Image (spheres, helix red, strand yellow):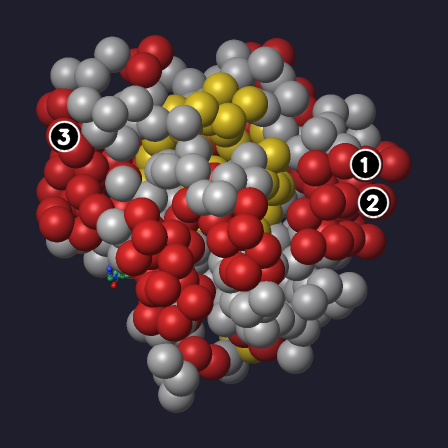
Amino acid sequence: MASITAQSLNTGAKIPAIGFGTWQDKDSQEGAVAEALKAGYRHIDTARVYGTEPAVGAAIKKSGIPRSELFITTKLWNNSHAPADVEPALDASLKDLGLDYVDLYLMHWPSAFKPGPELMPKVDGKMQTADISYVDTYKAMEKLLKTGKTKAIGISNFSKAELEKLLAETEVVPAAHQMELHPWLQQKEFVKFNQSKGIHITQYSPFGNQNEIYDAGKNMGKLMDDPVLVEIGKKYNKSGAQVALAWGINQGHSVIPKSKTPSRIAQNLQGDFKLDASDLEKIAGIDKKLRFNDASAGFGYKFYADLDGKK
Ligand code: NAD
């Protein structure tokens, strides 16, 4: 089995450059993760809110792969931002995953919802938010490192100003920032900023508008069919999808494509290859600054205020 590029975290740990996304298709995820593990993936991305932690856990258990060979990420949901709720939230995730620890625990969003059992606490269709600072939530996450229940902590979906405030007011530099990033939303300045702070970037939705939930991308062609990506792919005998993944990996990022189709699961793993500098330059030219995942309206919070692709 071909080995997967390992990227480094500021903790000294390694993160496999290709991981497996598990958002949506909850009922197919145990089979999909089992297929991914069989194909050679060793990095799995889940989240409390996806409801896929039990499926990920079952697939891991059945695989028989030693825990030390796996890199497992899960995420704290917005209803558990009250500092006292943070460790119990991780405990619940670990229970569903059937694990003693995760490799990376991320704050899924900087925005807090009303604390309580409801994941989406809405009244008359309006999200019930809470006045809890992500700084206080993160400080509770910092304490988790001492418990051994997570090896590293990080963030997701932060703006530059939010990240600057976090860095100024907390101790532990996030090991990773998971964000929407692909050749149509390249965020070059923000990428540089994260890298300058020693924060590893994990690219979610690495295929851009391929996720069918993204309304914004419905009436345009698919990123993976972009002629520049397809043309570059011919040189390496790769698809546009594989070139999109390689674009991220060649910048030192990890990518977490999702699929439940065995042939695509296998194909995506072959997106780990070296692109020539001239090809990276060509891809730099197709940035459309298009963001497809923006939960601002539904979550009652203004995300990405200072970033590319804002509405
Ligand atoms: P993606 O970019 O991985 O696209 C997934 C879709 O692309 C699949 O549903 C499938 O239809 C298609 N696809 C996959 N491989 C293909 C191939 N080789 N050829 C053709 N089509 C293919 O989208 P995503 O699911 O949005 O993102 C990946 C993962 O990132 C998620 O599953 C989740 O784990 C994570 N994520 C995190 C956040 C966050 O807020 N932190 C947000 C979105 C996604």
What residue does disc 1 label?
Answer: 167
- Quadrant of residue 214 within the rendered picture: bottom left
Residue 220 image position (x, y, % from top left): 40, 84
Q: Amino acid type of disc 1?
A: Leu
Q: Quadrant of residue 289?
A: bottom right
> Which three-letter amino acid code belongs to the residue tagged 2?
Glu
- Where does residue 33 sit, x and y in percent of width and height? 20, 39
Q: Which residue is mark 3?
A: 38
Residue at point 53% right, 16% down?
13
Relative vertical location of residue 199 with respect to residue 287 in this rendering, above or below: above
Which badge, 3 or 1, is on the more N-terminal residue? 3
Q: CA distance from mark 3 to mark 1?
A: 39 Å
* CA distance separating discs 3 and 2: 40 Å
Left-right relation of 61 to 255: left
Helix, strand or loop under label 2 = helix
Q: Nearer the viewer, residue 254 or 126?
A: 254
Labels 1 and 2 touching (C-beta < 8 A): yes
Residue denoted by label 2: 164
Disc 1 crowd, CA 10 A, few/some/many (<14, 14-19, 20+): some
Image quadrant of ligand 1 equals: bottom left
Q: Nearer the viewer, residue 48 or 176?
A: 176
Q: Is residue 136 left or right of residue 2?
A: right
Residue placed at 33% from the left, 60% from the top?
240
Sequence-first tag of 3 and 2? 3
Q: Depth check: give the residue in front, 79 or 201.
A: 201
> Of the residues tagged 3 and 2, which is closer to the observer?
3
